Amino acid sequence: MKLPAIFTLFVLSLDVSAFGMGEAINLAGRQRMLSQRIAQTYILQGIQPGIQRHEKVFNRSIQEFAQNHRKLSAFPKAGKLSPQLRKVQQEWEAFERIARQPASRDTAAELFRLSNRLLSAAHTYVVKLERLANHNSAELINIAGRQRMLSQRIAKNYAAKLWGISPGDAEIGLQQDLVEYTHRLNQLLDSPLNTPEINHNLRKALDHLNYANRGFTGKMQISEKRQIHVITGTTDLMLRNMNIITEQYAALLDSEGGIENSHSAN
């Protein structure tokens, strides 16, 4: 049964008004991650055609990007940032056109390039939201959200290197991302705003990173098929854990007195 248009708009307005600036930064940060996750799973479909998991994650990620963009477009507190959001939309349209094509080395190379452009536009929007929020915990949401993106860009660069897609850029990018992920993780661990729960999850993130590094350094003596499974599975664990951490930081920003409570918890 189709819902009346006025009821649909009412539901959408309730959905938008239900989240604050912290959640808006969280959602915008997920767009960075999704740009890399979509490219990663697109390349993996070329390396391992017929694997349903890659196709499922790919389709779900495309749907989520579009849904998040609609929510951010209707977020009233960030109306002044609409020009930057339009730039994200333009990059997304070019990116999605290629992503909808069957995976080949040529299309994967183009999507690899466009994923970096989409990431840049989405990141600029997150930074502008952070400045608009003007709160210490907003920076932590941004950093933790960037860690989610890095987990997926690490996997994207690994897959691109494996399939021979921009191998030089992929190798350099992979090493740079591992260094940045480590640096940012230490930065988060040093934050005085952390609750005990946040610190616990950050230490889990460090364990995941150490395990993934074994695959990148060649210490795992396993087949290529198994290595793809291990590395993508571990970077997914990194993603899920950093998603929890990002939501915890967003809750600090959106809850009254959250910052004072976090100080007293440490």
Image: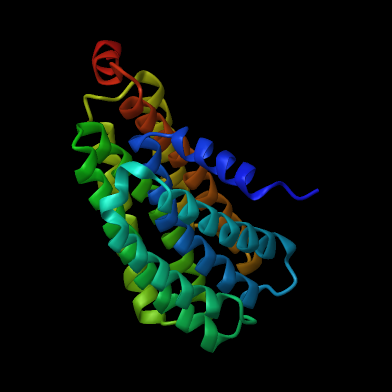
Image coordinates for residue 218, horizontal then vertical, percent: 47, 63
State the residue at coordinates (58%, 52%).
233
Q: Is residue 242 left or right of residue 87?
A: right
Q: Nearer the viewer, residue 220 or 118?
A: 118
Q: Residue furthest right?
A: 1
Q: Nearer the viewer, residue 25 or 139?
A: 25
Q: Nearer the viewer, residue 30 or 254?
A: 254
Is residue 179 in view?
A: no
Instruction: Specify the quadrant of the image occupied by residue 143.
Output: top left
Image coordinates for residue 44, horizontal then vertical, percent: 60, 70
State the residue at coordinates (41%, 80%).
167
State the residue at coordinates (55%, 43%).
12
Q: Nearer the viewer, residue 167 or 198?
A: 198
Is residue 66 in view?
A: yes
Instruction: Specify the quadrant of the image occupied by residue 200.
Output: top left
Image coordinates for residue 165, horizontal then vertical, percent: 47, 81
Position of 126 relative to 38 (above/below): above
